[in-house]
């Protein structure tokens, strides 16, 4: 089960990295759209459109960042076998079940790995400090 926990941790990090990459590209797209509107539109129209583009774009970027952060933290915690990461991983896996199709696959795999008794023992052994 140790291998499955590590694979799940890497998968969570990869999915979160894709979310962070999407946030970066969205930020670049909003910046490009703002530049195009500022140069191509009438000054009065641009003064109305630019705040709307900026606020909505940054809200979407923040939304993507907030969705990606828990998966990144969970993935790192799973790779280090932290007991709290198992609980957070179970919660994220349950939430991922509604993200058809890839999130569902990740959620089912995560629940299978993290709810397994062998995984529970792995995390319990990692929580006990060695003397």
Image (tube, rainbow, N blue to C red):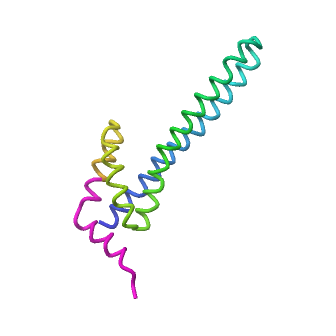
Would you say residue 124 sits in the magenta stretch?
A: yes
Q: Is residue 1 left or right of 80 when viewed as pictured? A: left
Residue visible at 27% across and 67% down in the picture: 120
Whether 102 is drawn above or below 115: the answer is above
Residue visible at 71% across and 21% down in the picture: 36
Quadrant housing residue 48: top right
Q: Which residues are magenta?
A: 111-131
Looking at the figure, which quarter contains the C terminus?
Answer: bottom left
Q: Nearer the viewer, residue 29 or 54?
A: 54
Residue 60 in the image: state x and y as whole percent. Answer: 54, 33
Residue 7 in the image: state x and y as whole percent. Answer: 38, 58
Whether 60 is drawn above or below 118: the answer is above
Whether 36 is drawn above or below 114: the answer is above
Q: Is residue 54 left or right of 43 when viewed as pictured? A: left
Would you say residue 121 sits in the magenta stretch?
A: yes
Residue 91 in the image: state x and y as whole percent. Answer: 33, 51
Residue 6 in the image: state x and y as whole percent. Answer: 39, 62
Quadrant housing residue 41: top right
């Amino acid at each position: 089960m140790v291998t499955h926990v590590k694979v799940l941790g890497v998968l969570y990090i990869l999915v979160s990295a894709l979310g962070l990459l999407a946030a970066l590209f969205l930020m670049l797209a909003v910046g490009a759209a703002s530049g195009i509107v500022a140069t191509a539109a009438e000054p009065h129209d641009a003064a109305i459109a630019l705040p709307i583009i900026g606020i909505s774009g940054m809200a979407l970027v923040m939304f993507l960042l907030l969705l990606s952060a828990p998966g990144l933290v969970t993935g790192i915690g799973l790779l280090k076998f932290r007991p709290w990461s198992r609980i957070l991983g179970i919660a994220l896996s349950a939430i991922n079940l509604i993200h058809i199709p890839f999130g569902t696959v990740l959620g089912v795999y995560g629940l299978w790995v993290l709810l397994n008794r062998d995984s529970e023992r792995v995390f319990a052994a990692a929580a006990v400090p060695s003397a």
